[in-house]
Amino acid sequence: MRTQKQQVGDSGEKEIVRHAPCPNCGKKLTGLPKNYPLYDVQCEGCSFRAQVKTSKSNSKSTVRGAGWDIIHKVLKAGFMSPPLIVNFNPPNRNQEILFFPFVPRSCLTKYRLSKNHRQANYAMFDYCGLDELPHFRLAKKGNKRFWMVNKEPKIKKYKIDCEPL
């Protein structure tokens, strides 16, 4: 039987599949099987895949991640952490869906569950510092949804000067 938190996550993934287009090509996202490693959704038209996290609170900088072992092995093998879609859906407030195309390792914080938890001392991680990362906001325009670049980026913009060879 699924826990309350797992049920919230399942419903959040279903909302993303129903409402969010692929940020790469705009086609429909589909859900992957439960407990699929690292990814929760994939695109029907291209090779895009992403991790989905759901929070029943307002937008915040830290979101619970998952088990540390698999992400640690992926990062240790030289791969990047998967793109992240966060579904903030507080009761009686506006929903906000954010897409983070790149989450650096420095934004993954490892912790262990308490000794009183049913999975005592299990290694987990949180996504932290999300408010400082570049992201896209899923906005509603008419009846269609689309990806919109965040209007107020909190990170510095750099100008790159290119010289011809």
Image (tube, helix red, strand yellow):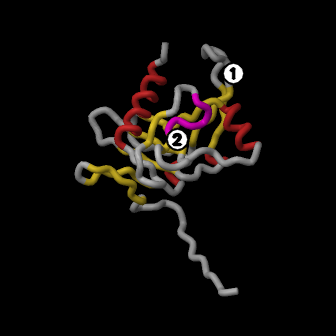
Magenta stretch? 36-41
- Main SS of the magenta part reads loop
Separation of marks 2 and 1 at Cα, in angstroms: 21 Å
131 or 65, which is in the foreground? 65
Dot 1: within a 10 Å radius of its alpha carbon, few (fewer than 14), some, or many (20 or more) residues? few
Per the image, the residue denoted by label 1 is 121
Query: Under tag 2, what secondary structure?
Result: loop
Task: Judge left or right: residue 148 versus residue 93.
Answer: right
Task: Judge left or right: residue 88 versus residue 66.
Answer: left
Where residue 101 appears, as percent x and y from the top left, is: 54, 52
Which quarter of the figure has residue 51? Answer: top right
The vertical placement of 155 against 44, above or below, is: below
Residue 132 on the magenta segment: no
110 or 165, which is in the foreground? 165
Per the image, the residue denoted by label 2 is 62
Where residue 134 appears, as percent x and y from the top left, is: 51, 57
Q: Residue furthest left?
A: 142
Where residue 53 appears, as percent x and y from the top left, is: 49, 36
The vertical placement of 75 against 112, above or below, is: below
